[in-house]
Image (spheres, grey):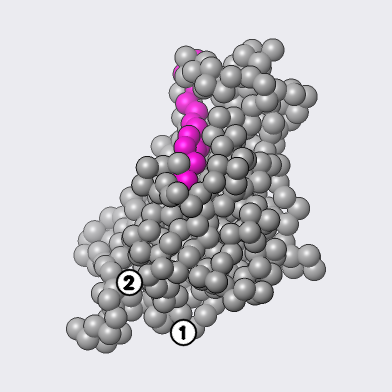
Amino acid sequence: MKKIQMVDLQSQYQKIQPQVDKVILEVVSSAAFINGPEVKNFQTELEKYLQVKHVIPCANGTDALQIAMMGLGLEQGDEVITADFTFAATVEVIALLKLTPVLVDVDADTFNMNIDALKKAITPKTKAIVPVHLFGQCANLEAILEVAKENNLFIIEDNAQAIGADYIFKDGTSKKAGTIGNVGTTSFFPSKNLGCYGDGGAIFTNDDDLAHTIRGMVNHGMYKRYYHEVVGVNSRLDSIQAAVLRIKLPILDNYCNARRTAAEYYNDAFASIDKIITPITSAFTTHVFHQYTLRVNGIDRNALHQHLLDNEIPNAIYYPVPLHLQKAYADSRYNEDDFKVTNELIDTVISLPMHTEFEKEQQDYIIKTILDFVK
Ligand SMILES: *Cc1c(COP(=O)(O)O)cnc(C)c1O
């Protein structure tokens, strides 16, 4: 059996190696390393895939969030609401821009923003909501859209973990995750569902004016060369990464399907085990399983974590500390009673290996090792 990895990027690369090697060498010999045709072509292809008017590539998913907030004109003291249970990038950029992060609890079954907590957190200073489509499925966007409309707030979708997922509206129509709020962001970090071979990110919007503003902002605030209208940043996707992404984008749906198949295989194996709660998919979204995250029920999560490591099965605790308890983001405004779910999740979640390249015997071995522990 091949060694089990949390994300098997080497096997994935082997299957596309000839195409990838070829385009990387082409970029090198063309010397169009920055803003070459590969970047422009990838942008157009991603716009088409997402059915969104504007994709603005940038250097990584954290920059994408920061630039989206800058583009919306958020100002010091504006409150921005996001989920307590997520990767820190989301809250980090809010704090860096001297906006005020407001963290809210999540739902235990979907790990996504709780709508009552969101409503409760709104104040006259609230300017934006950042739903994070955690682990590969959409947050409850229709409810969030309603809250945003009532209170005149922007929505910035942090779609670093759910590219390729569909949000299904009550009327049966659907749109791609990240294209529904005022602006969406993603990351092409290698282990993300659409990963490049270094750092990369993108911003999506259907708003022409916002797209124009952001295109200047990613390029030092220039709308005309060497004329700096606003304070911008330097955030670019390089041509080699774009070339790799152009090979992988047409396979993204296959990758999502492979992840779903692997998730169903795990789900079936654990279905009858009370001590393990398998992930659910909300009715309003498809799931692209960036992570496959179990919750344990009445067993010692840390002991399971160690048992898997002892058997050479990588696994991870996403996330071990809620953001409201992180030293950098702690705030006397927060009340522990408001974070009951997150406070429980950090002790009960465990993410299993999840990627596009499983061999059946690998998953069987992971499942057997877990069943041996719980039985
Ligand atoms: C990965 C990730 C980011 C940041 O992306 P980078 O490309 O690593 O900067 C932001 N938000 C979430 C939810 C992520 O998972």
Image coordinates of residue 308 in percent, x first then y, are: 52, 19
Residue 207 drawn above or below residue 143: below
Residue 145 is situated, as x and y percent measured from the top left of the image, at 65, 68
Is the stretch drawn in magenta largely helix, strand or loop?
A: loop
Mark 1 residue element:
helix
Q: Which residue is mark 1?
A: 209
Mark 2: which amino acid? Val
Q: What residue is drawn where x is 56% and y is 37%?
A: 343
Q: Is residue 229 left or right of residue 60?
A: left
**Where does the magenta region start and end?**
311-324
Q: Is residue 54 above or below residue 372?
A: below
The residue labelled by disc 2 is: 218
The residue sitting at 46% across, 23% down in the picture is: 3
Is 45 on the left-hand or right-hand side of 98?
right
Report the residue at 52% width, 80% height from top.
Answer: 207
Q: Nearer the viewer, residue 175 or 214?
A: 214
